[in-house]
Amino acid sequence: GREWQLLSRPVGWPKSEDFALVETEVPAPGPGRVLVRNTYLSVDPYMRGRMSAAKSYVAPYELGKAMQGGAVGEVVASEAEGIAVGDHVLHFFGWREYAVVAAENAVKVDPDAAPLPAYLGVLGMTGLTAYAGLLRTAAFKEGDSVFVSGAAGAVGSQVGQIAKLKGASRVVGSAGSDEKVKLLVEEYGFDAAFNYRNGPVSEQLRAAAPDGIDVYFDNVGGDHLEAAIGSLDRGGRIAICGAISVYNNTEPAPGPKNLARLIQTRGRIEGFLVNDHYDLQPQFVQEVGAWVRSGELKYRETVVEGIENNLEAFLGVLRGDNTGKMIVRL
Ligand code: NDP
């Protein structure tokens, strides 16, 4: 089977020379393990962080070894009790065609309950990120006015729709193309949306949310964060989910210049990591699963075919090629 290895740590935008697609032998699973043939691989912005040596909440990828990431696959050999050949499992050994996974690191998923890629997106990690970040970290409540950046992406598209479904007074999103902006308003029911490439974020946000915002869900950082602080109403909350606009920076990005506005507004900024919120998983799957089945919550996926395009799919996420969750299908 083939696997993607990291050869050198990218500086700035990752280059193809930093990676290699390598053929390796497929081993027998061994006691307590299963051999999985991966069918769907996740590519996510946080992977850029793991390509760097900097200390973070997960260890850096090791050079000369397969990279990791969320994946769904079919069990083709099992030496583990409770998991049979033919079962589909969610696990963390993506970036490769075949993976040997210890039973305790594999979660069985039901292809009849939801399409398999949904377990990586709308009903998976990115969905829970939206749910926990909005409802818990940002302490969203009915009547709040909400702004979300990266709004056509996996997390952002769900944040905006969950806010709407839970009674937001206004939901505003930003994204990087006019087509995505149109999708937000016409399909996802956002009250307003703008293309951040079309003009200063602060001005566009003020026009889209003239009465200000109570919640900002930040996927982007940089001038989006600064603009949101500038539009924050009294008691406003900002959940820091990601900062994709600076992931390829070689120098630290300057912080917002207007932080003192939080004094006036009694505002709060708080970062969160989805890993700390898996206690919400059952509630999330039940509530969001029902909205997905009823069609009240819509989602898109951008699907790239083939292990050989795994790296391009990842780079595509950083460029904004995706609408909704970016998935690689093998
Ligand atoms: P997305 O599906 O949103 O894909 C990333 C999107 O970012 C692209 O589609 C692109 O859309 C946008 N983007 C790229 N560069 C820029 C830029 N310079 N300025 C503004 N937007 C940009 O990814 P996810 O939904 O998986 O992740 C969204 C965010 O959430 C990321 O920051 C990620 O790191 C974070 N995250 C955090 C977690 C946590 O636990 N805290 C867990 C999961 C994700 P466009 O065309 O609009 O530019």
Image (cartoon, helix red, strand yellow):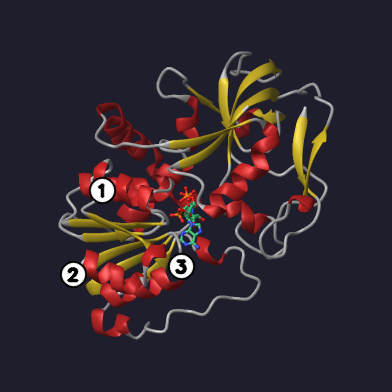
The residue where tag 2 is placed is 210
| Quarter of the picture holding the N terminus | top right
Q: Nearer the viewer, residue 304 or 47?
A: 304
Residue 129 visible to an observer of this rendering: no
Q: Is residue 181 left or right of residue 302?
A: left
Helix, strand or loop for disc 2: loop
Label 2 neighbourhood size at 10 Å, few (<14), some (14-19), many (20+)?
A: few
Label 3 neighbourhood size at 10 Å, few (<14), some (14-19), many (20+)?
A: many
Which residue type carries mark 3? Gly
Image quadrant in which you'd find residue 141 = bottom left
The residue where tag 3 is placed is 221
Which residue type carries mark 2? Pro
Q: Is residue 98 left or right of residue 181?
A: right
Q: Give the residue displayed 21% in from the left and 44% down from the top.
A: 165
Is label 3 within 8 A of ligand 1 (CB to nearest ligand atom)?
A: yes
Is label 2 within 8 A of ligand 1 (CB to nearest ligand atom)?
A: no
Q: Give the residue displayed 35% in from the left and 39% down from the top.
A: 284
N-term mark: 1 or 3 = 1
